[in-house]
Amino acid sequence: MEKITLIEAKNLSTQANTLHAFLGRTGGISPPPFSSLNVGFHVGDRRANVEENLRTIEERLGFNMERAVIPRQVHGDHIVHIKNTGMCGAGIYSADALVTDLRGVALCILTADCVPIILVDRGGRVAAIIHAGWRGTLKSIATKTIKKLKALYGIEPEELVCAVGPAIGGCCYRVDATLIEGFSTAFRGSPGVDRRASSLDLKSINCWQIEKEGVKDIEVIDTCTACNVDSFFSHRKEGTTGRQLNVVMLRG
Ligand SMILES: [Zn+2]
């Protein structure tokens, strides 16, 4: 079997008591077009394959899937506060961001081009994970998550460490003129909105939002999912395909 594609951000790896990973598509058992480490139950793959893939990831990363939260992602800006382990499970909550201060609870989101964003504070007290496609980015879901961490836990943006994972790059993400206009108006001065090429770089736009909130330590994984379909699922490039897992957990 192929090895698992697993990317870690340097700035998060040095945080004590934090487990995180941006996974790719290799090392699982699903057949095409979900080959092979698909973790999406909703894409048409067999349930047993997805469950086996999740077990493989569990073993590799050393966390318990029964203590994981995988939301039903709806391209909105709803943030769910995970307050107790009774809230763990897959597809229970509709949300595109999760925040917690619970130890040993894995916050997960699935992607295939959309931007996965992880935030933890330097004191290791809180963790957040965000799924930002164009709709979530336009709704400033990253900005709202940072504000939520402050409102719920009193964490200042300066205390946060942020990593932006593999996602579709400006090289491959052409959109229509209306959307370009929408982004130019909403995020005046942000990089990542290219009128001439009619393309969006969602990673840059999210970074701009995050920086603007006052987060200084941001690491961007500069990998385009659509340029690298050997290693990552890309909905834009492939159409029907799988989803890769992105995860953060505060260790107990
Ligand atoms: Zn690309």
Image (cartoon, helix red, strand yellow):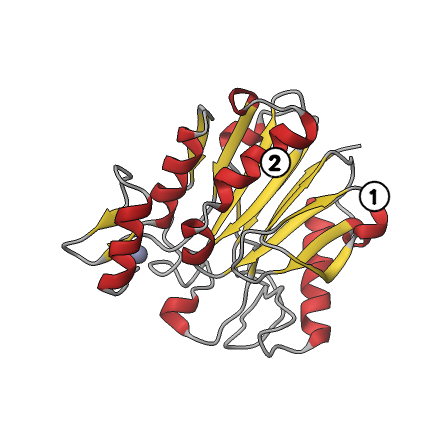
Q: Which residue is found at the position 41% from the left and 42% from the top?
A: 206
Q: Which residue is found at the position 60% from the left and 51% from the top?
A: 78
Specify the amino acid type for callout 1: Asn
Alpha-carbon neighbours of circle 2 within 10 Å: few (<14), some, or many (≥20)?
some
Alpha-carbon neighbours of circle 1 within 10 Å: few (<14), some, or many (≥20)?
few
Q: Give percent across and percent down for residue 90.
A: 73, 61
The circle on residue 148 is 2
**Furthest-right residue in view?**
86
Asked if residue 60 lies left or right of residue 190, the reply is: right
> Pointer 1 and pointer 2: residues touching (CB < 8 Å)?
no
Which image quarter has ligand 1?
Answer: bottom left
Between residues 193 and 106, which one lies in front from this camera angle? Answer: 193
| Pointer 1 residue | 84
Residue 171 visible within the image? no
Specify the amino acid type for callout 2: Lys
SS label for mark 1: loop
Asked if residue 193 lies left or right of residue 96, the reply is: left
Query: In the picture, which quadrant includes the C terminus?
Result: top right
Q: Residue 92, relative to residue 88: is it above or below? A: below
Asked if residue 197 lies left or right of residue 15, the reply is: left
Between residues 158 and 120, which one lies in front from this camera angle? Answer: 158
SS label for mark 2: helix
Q: Which residue is found at the position 56% from the left and 62% from the top?
A: 74
Q: Earlier in the sequence, mark 1 or mark 2?
A: 1
Q: Which residue is found at the position 55% from the left and 34% from the top?
A: 146
Q: Give percent across and percent down for residue 217.
A: 46, 25
